[in-house]
Image: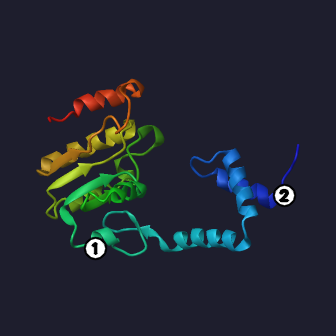
């Protein structure tokens, strides 16, 4: 069996540790890095080093930032009475990309998952509840539409409702351009439950 050099093997092993990257993809990425110029490869290495040294969590919303508090929390034109709760920082990026939401965020740092050992104390739930006393009128629960995300949303709703803060959940259902025949049962159920009047 063909053996690669120790350096290439180490690079492939490290790349394969990334989520969604299997051994074949890791090998392809490693050989791509070897093929590009040294400047390009060092630029990639420098970018990785910079984010590890400079990026941290915002002390208010727990989004990723180089400045504390983050640019969204500092923005006085945003609606501070609305907080959109998401699981991870990349969820903030997805919502910001559409340019429709003008409130603030709160990043939980994951979702409740007892099987994986993730309980309420492992998430930024206490910090969210502390923020609600600062004039917040609505909390939008935008956790993922899977078992863990639904459990997290339900848990948060039970904690927030008694505080007399409006709690809403992002709608779920059929994607634009989707076909009914290809939708799974859970998606169709949610689409019917979350139907709107025209």
In the rendered image, the vertical position of residue 190 relative to residue 18, given as above or below = above
Q: Name which residue lies at 39% across and 59% down.
A: 93
How far across and how far down the image is residue 186, in percent? 35, 28
Q: Looking at the picture, tell me which residue is in the foreground, 108 or 181.
A: 181
Residue found at the very far front of the displayed protein: 177
**Mark 2 and mark 1: Cα distance apart in space:** 49 Å
Specify which label sits upstream in the sequence, 2 or 1.
Answer: 2
Q: Quadrant of residue 33?
A: bottom right
The residue identified by callout 1 is 74
* 62 with respect to 191 (left or right): right
Labels 2 and 1 touching (C-beta < 8 A):
no
Q: Quadrant of residue 173?
A: top left
In the rendered image, the vertical position of residue 73 relative to residue 162, given as above or below = below
Which of the numbered marks, if any, corresponds to residue 5?
2
Q: Give the position of the N terminus as an image quadrant.
A: top right
Please rate how many residues cluster around mark 1, counting C-alpha atoms within 10 Å: few if below 14, some from 14 to 19, many from 20: few
Residue found at the very far left of the displayed protein: 164
How far across and how far down the image is residue 140, in percent? 24, 50
Q: Secondary structure at mark 1?
A: helix
In the rendered image, the vertical position of residue 84 relative to residue 134, given as above or below = above
* 116 with respect to 44 (left or right): left
Does any portion of residue 127 appear in the rendered image?
A: no
Q: Looking at the picture, tell me which residue is in the foreground, 150 or 125.
A: 150
How far across and how far down the image is residue 169, in percent? 24, 44
Q: Name which residue lies at 30% across and 59% down.
A: 99
Q: Name which residue lies at 14% across and 56% down.
A: 137
Q: Looking at the picture, tell me which residue is in the foreground, 113 or 61.
A: 61
Q: Looking at the picture, tell me which residue is in the foreground, 123 or 65.
A: 65
Total residue callouts? 2
How far across and how far down the image is residue 73, in percent? 28, 69
Q: Give the position of the C terminus as an image quadrant.
A: top left
């Amino acid at each position: 069996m063909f053996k690669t050099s120790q350096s290439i093997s180490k690079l492939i092993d490290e790349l394969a540790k990334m989520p969604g990257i299997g051994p074949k993809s890791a090998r392809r990425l490693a050989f791509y890095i070897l093929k590009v110029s040294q400047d390009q490869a060092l630029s990639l290495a420098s970018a990785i080093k910079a984010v590890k040294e400079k990026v941290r969590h915002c002390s208010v919303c727990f989004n990723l930032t180089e400045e504390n508090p983050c640019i969204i929390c500092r923005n006085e034109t945003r609606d501070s009475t609305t907080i959109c709760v998401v699981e991870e920082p990349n969820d903030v990026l997805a919502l910001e990309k559409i340019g429709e939401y003008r409130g603030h965020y709160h990043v939980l740092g994951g979702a409740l998952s007892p099987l994986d050992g993730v309980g309420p104390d492992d998430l930024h739930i206490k910090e969210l509840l502390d923020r609600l006393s600062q004039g917040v009128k609505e909390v939008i629960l935008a956790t993922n539409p899977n078992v863990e995300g639904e459990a997290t949303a339900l848990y948060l709703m039970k904690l927030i409702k008694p505080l007399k803060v409006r709690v809403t959940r992002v709608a779920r259902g059929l994607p634009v351009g989707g076909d009914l025949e290809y939708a799974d049962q859970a998606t169709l159920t949610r689409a019917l439950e979350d139907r709107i009047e025209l």
